[in-house]
């Protein structure tokens, strides 16, 4: 057969065996070297596909998912990683007393306090101030000299107490005979101090316990019991009213008027005079930026002369008044002065209870949004002086405090330190729950990519959370909680963690088929042919061997 | 996705068992609206008109522009084919110009993409995004999500170029829920086979409604012969009719259930669907929600009683004194700080170190090295193979 085909172009074919059934001529047999070369070509193609193509495809199409410490994150979210406790140090200054007596009093008061307290997360720890009396307590006070409140015991005629307005000091006077003796196990003065302390911190305690209870993730034993429905209601209202924490707020003061007058106002001076002091003392907790505007010919959403409560919610003409400047990245608090002689008619029943006579008011607060103040002015007045703005701005100031979530009772320094503690607890819980959300999300969406910056943010969050948790009750906690919350938010809202996650199978086929079809078919067919040929050769070889043996 | 609901179950159970009062009492404090038209080109005029009509409605009921996210993929008002330049009408009587002179479009033209939509919902945006284009909601926000365009079984087409799947939408809502970005959502969609789009949702507190069932088209209501194209879809038209006639202002007491009951096959020509099962409290609670809970801007204002001026003035003078005292203290502190600056430096160093507590690049470094080595070895192998094959053999 081989001999005939070498000269196929010349020789007229004669034997039937060299033809196919169709009468077509067979190609010449391949050389052994060609066969081997073809095998090598096919093998090398397959090697490239398997060793180079497949890893590259795998590498380029896998979604990068940074390892997240999921268990730890969930621990934080479920409140297992941190027991939020607020050990508030209260130092007692009793310079008139003997050291022994004072210590005894402190011990008794502490007992009385512990008996009164029913919420483990928030407890007051008394200690004797070291001033003037170096003793064994100094070591402890040096360690953490940040006491939330100082009790100043002064000898007087009768038992009385007063909060110092300028600093966190509770002045208590006591008659000289009320000092407990060394042996007595209870004392009227001690329990009096305890009750006073308790009532001073009652609101803070209630707010924090409410915060913990609304964050459902915290275990039940950490929650306070016995919150009355009214108290819970008031607390819910406070939560509704107060803005979400932000390190900076943008205050917008707007003057709206129905006509063309007044066209100027002395807002800068008024703010400096009536609001700046309060903003200044808030600086450790918040920063503020301010802008102002005047809008003429502004019609309110409601035209009637006497506004009732339903009207108030549509008084602000959101469609036409330019109220959200979105300057910078800070949330805006709106303070609106509307020049007009409308009055607010309150339901009489509500009013009769409080003070009867006046059934009108000038301003109202919109939760999480700001305040509107109606300012009646003579019609021809073109300029609003700073003194006219005094009342509106004082109202705005007190509303700002309540919008920020400042508690209502107590002296101002105490209210502020309470605010910072509440906010640090709030931020701590928020950051923890964000961690939990991220952990659950990364489990639930297996095809979402998690860049390493997220893991980085998570580890930063957790280290700051740990620090915040350990220092709760001190001013440093707010800083750490704030950083933790920022990092947690940044990790959760990582920009690249988005994309279409779900691709139907049809889409995948549509993407891969045009590529893999033309390339894959020759590859697979080549391999199959080669395998077939190899098996045939082997069988022939075996047959030949058998034939040889037989002969 | 199942996993998350399982994981959340204990928490939800605990919440239900332990704090029922607080959960029930929680109310929403802000209203947001996300209004999306997804189709471009002149013949899709009606989708733009749909979305603008809803925009007018929510604005009429008090939601400010800063809380409305409006996505318009094309500018019909300025289309050269528009016989009434600068206007968009949703009715052949052309009584109300929907475009008007007071409209704030947040995403326009080619910005309307699936990615931007999902980014908007999940708030995964960069720092460059202005606040007005973000959905800055929290766990007290009610959101109205209205979408219209051309859709099919479990997808909605964006801009003739891409599509959002029902799964992606469901995952986006789940991420919002997970991050406490909404209180309740009313999801409305007007497209062909619209009801399939909400079939995959699995996050709680969502009421969903759509214009048509699987394999049903959503039809346009009527055409304006002068504009030359259909101006509004049926489902949206009858929704609007209800909202215009029954919900006159923010104090309306009409409920979501009333709106859903007004849907009629005779009018809409397709079976409008409603989904309540995700809502806490089921159909009954969902149906009893007021229309204005989603379409209006609810503000529970607190009116001040008569003023107690002295108290506020006290507060002011107090703050002044405290600020002065604090300044004084700060100055002293600063002086003290200067004295031992080195100590301060040491502490800040410690703090900085703490921030990089966990270097996360180590394993990456090794994989990179390994990768490089493999590549080099592969090349060498190839070269060796090539030269082996090339070499003449006897």
Image (spheres, coloured by chain):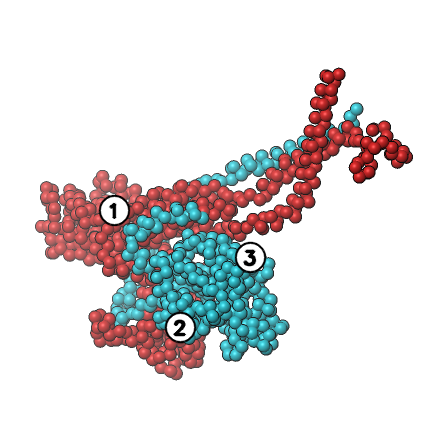
Q: A382 or B239, which is in the foreground?
A: B239
Q: Colour of chain B?
A: cyan
For disc 3, the neighbor class at 10 Å (few under 14, some 14 to 19, many from 20) is many
The residues tagged by marks 1 and 3 sit, at their Cα atoms, a distance apart of 54 Å
Horizontal placement of B89 versus A359: left or right? right
Q: Position of residue A495 (x, y in %)?
A: 51, 52
Task: Kindly tell me whether residue A80 is visible in this rendering.
Answer: yes
Q: A321 or B269, which is in the foreground?
A: B269
The reply to whether label 1 and label 2 mark residues of one chain is no
Q: Please report the residue visible at 71 percent of the width from the left and 29 percent of the height from the top.
A: A536
Task: Kindly tell me whether residue B126 is visible in this rendering.
Answer: no
Which numbered disc covers residue A120?
Answer: 1
Q: Position of residue A219 (x, y in %)?
A: 30, 46
For disc 2, the neighbor class at 10 Å (few under 14, some 14 to 19, many from 20) is many
In the displayed orientation, state which residue is furthest to the bottom: A380
Q: Is residue A240 above or below residue A341?
A: above
Residue with the mark numbered 3 = B163
Q: Position of residue A134 (x, y in %)?
A: 22, 41
The reply to whether label 3 and label 2 mark residues of one chain is yes
Residue with the mark numbered 2 = B247
* Quadrant position of the C terminus of chain A in the picture: top right
In the displayed orientation, state which residue is furthest to the right: A10
Q: Chain of mark 1?
A: A
Precedes in sequence: disc 3 or disc 2: 3
Q: Colour of chain A?
A: red
Badge 3 marks a residue whose secondary structure is: strand
Which of discs 1 and 3 lies nearer the camera? The answer is 3
Badge 2 marks a residue whose secondary structure is: loop
Q: Chain of mark 2?
A: B
Q: Chain of mark 3?
A: B
């Amino acid at each position: 057969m081989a001999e005939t085909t070498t000269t196929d172009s010349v020789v007229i074919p004669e034997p039937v065996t060299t033809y196919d059934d169709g009468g077509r001529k067979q190609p010449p047999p391949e050389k052994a070297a060609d066969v081997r070369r073809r095998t090598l070509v096919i093998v090398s193609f397959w090697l490239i596909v398997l060793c180079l193509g497949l890893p590259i495809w795998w590498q380029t199409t896998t979604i990068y998912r940074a390892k997240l410490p999921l268990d730890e994150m969930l621990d934080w979210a479920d409140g297992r990683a941190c027991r939020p406790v607020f050990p508030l140090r209260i130092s007692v200054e009793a310079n008139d007393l003997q050291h022994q007596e004072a210590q005894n009093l402190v011990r008794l008061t502490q007992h009385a306090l512990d008996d009164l307290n029913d919420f483990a997360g928030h407890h007051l720890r008394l200690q004797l101030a070291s001033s003037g009396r170096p003793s064994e307590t100094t070591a402890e006070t040096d360690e953490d000299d940040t006491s939330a409140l100082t009790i100043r015991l002064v000898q007087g005629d009768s038992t009385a107490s007063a909060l110092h307005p300028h600093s966190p000091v509770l002045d208590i006077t006591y008659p000289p005979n009320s000092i407990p003796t060394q042996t007595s196990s209870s004392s009227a003065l001690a329990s009096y101090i305890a009750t006073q302390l308790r009532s001073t911190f009652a609101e803070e305690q209630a707010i924090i316990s409410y915060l913990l209870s609304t964050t459902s993730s915290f275990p039940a034993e950490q929650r306070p019991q016995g919150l009355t429905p009214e108290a819970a209601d008031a607390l819910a209202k406070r939560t509704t009213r107060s803005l979400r924490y932000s390190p900076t707020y943008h205050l917008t003061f707007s003057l709206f008027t129905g006509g063309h007058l007044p066209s100027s106002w002395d807002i800068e001076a008024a703010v400096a005079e009536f609001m700046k002091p309060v903003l200044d003392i808030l600086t450790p907790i918040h920063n503020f930026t301010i802008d102002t505007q005047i809008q003429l010919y502004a019609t309110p959403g409601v035209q009637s002369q006497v506004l009732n409560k339903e009207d108030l919610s549509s008084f602000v003409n959101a469609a036409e008044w330019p109220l959200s400047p979105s300057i910078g990245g800070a949330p805006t608090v709106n303070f609106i002065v509307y020049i007009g002689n409308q009055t607010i008619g309150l339901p009489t029943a509500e009013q009769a209870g409080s003070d009867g006579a006046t059934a009108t008011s000038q301003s109202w607060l919109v939760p999480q949004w700001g305040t509107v103040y109606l300012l009646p002015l003579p019609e021809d007045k073109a300029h609003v002086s700073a003194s006219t703005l005094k009342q509106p701005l004082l109202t705005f100031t007190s509303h700002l405090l309540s919008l920020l979530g400042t508690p209502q009772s107590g002296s101002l320094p105490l209210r502020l330190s309470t605010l910072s503690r509440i906010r640090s607890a709030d931020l701590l819980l928020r950051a923890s729950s964000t961690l939990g959300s991220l952990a659950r999300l990364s489990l639930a969406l297996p095809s979402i990519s998690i860049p390493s910056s997220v893991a980085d943010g998570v580890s930063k969050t957790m280290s700051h959370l740990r620090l915040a948790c350990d220092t709760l009750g001190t001013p440093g906690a707010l800083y750490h909680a704030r950083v933790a919350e920022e990092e947690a938010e940044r990790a959760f809202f990582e920009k690249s963690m988005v994309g279409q996650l779900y691709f139907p199978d049809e889409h995948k086929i549509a993407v891969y088929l045009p590529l893999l079809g033309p390339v894959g078919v020759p590859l697979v067919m080549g391999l199959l042919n080669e395998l077939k040929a190899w098996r045939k050769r082997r069988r022939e070889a075996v047959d030949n061997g058998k034939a040889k043996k037989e002969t | 996705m199942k996993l998350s609901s399982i994981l959340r179950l204990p928490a939800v159970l605990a919440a239900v068992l332990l704090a029922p009062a607080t959960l029930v009492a929680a109310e929403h404090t802000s209203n947001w609206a996300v209004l999306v038209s997804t189709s471009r080109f002149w013949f899709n005029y009606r989708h733009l008109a749909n979305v603008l009509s809803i925009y007018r409605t929510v604005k009429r009921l008090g939601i400010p522009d800063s809380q409305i996210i409006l996505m318009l993929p094309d500018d019909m008002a300025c289309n050269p084919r528009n016989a009434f330049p600068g206007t968009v009408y949703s009715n052949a009587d052309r009584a109300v110009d929907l475009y008007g002179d007071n409209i704030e479009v947040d995403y326009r033209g080619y910005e309307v993409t699936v990615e931007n939509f999902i980014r908007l919902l999940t708030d995964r945006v960069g720092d460059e995004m202005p606040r007005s284009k973000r959905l800055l909601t929290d766990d007290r926000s009610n959101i109205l999500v209205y979408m219209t365009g051309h859709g099919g079984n479990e997808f909605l087409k964006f801009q003739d170029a891409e599509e959002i799947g029902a799964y992606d939408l469901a995952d986006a809502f789940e991420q919002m829920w997970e991050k406490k970005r909404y209180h309740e959502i009313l999801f409305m969609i007007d497209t062909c086979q619209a009801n399939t789009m909400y079939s995959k949702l699995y996050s709680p507190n969502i009421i969903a409604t759509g214009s048509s069932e699987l394999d049903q088209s959503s039809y346009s209501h009527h055409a304006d012969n002068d504009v030359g194209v259909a101006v509004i879809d049926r489902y949206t038209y009858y929704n609007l009719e209800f909202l215009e006639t029954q919900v006159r202002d923010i104090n309306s007491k009409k409920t979501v259930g009333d709106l859903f009951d007004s849907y009629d096959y005779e009018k809409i020509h397709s079976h409008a669907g409603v989904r309540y099962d995700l809502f806490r409290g089921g159909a009954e609670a969902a149906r009893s929600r007021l229309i204005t809970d989603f379409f209006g801007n609810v503000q529970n204002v607190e009116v001040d009683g008569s003023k107690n001026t002295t108290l506020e003035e006290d507060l002011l003078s107090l703050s002044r004194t405290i600020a002065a005292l604090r300044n004084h203290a700060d100055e002293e502190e600063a002086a003290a700080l200067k004295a031992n600056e080195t100590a301060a430096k040491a502490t800040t160093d410690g703090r900085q170190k703490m921030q990089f507590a966990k270097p996360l690049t180590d394993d990456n470094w090794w994989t990179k090295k390994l990768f490089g080595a493999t590549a080099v070895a592969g090349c060498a192998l190839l070269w060796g193979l090539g030269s082996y094959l090339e070499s003449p053999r006897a």
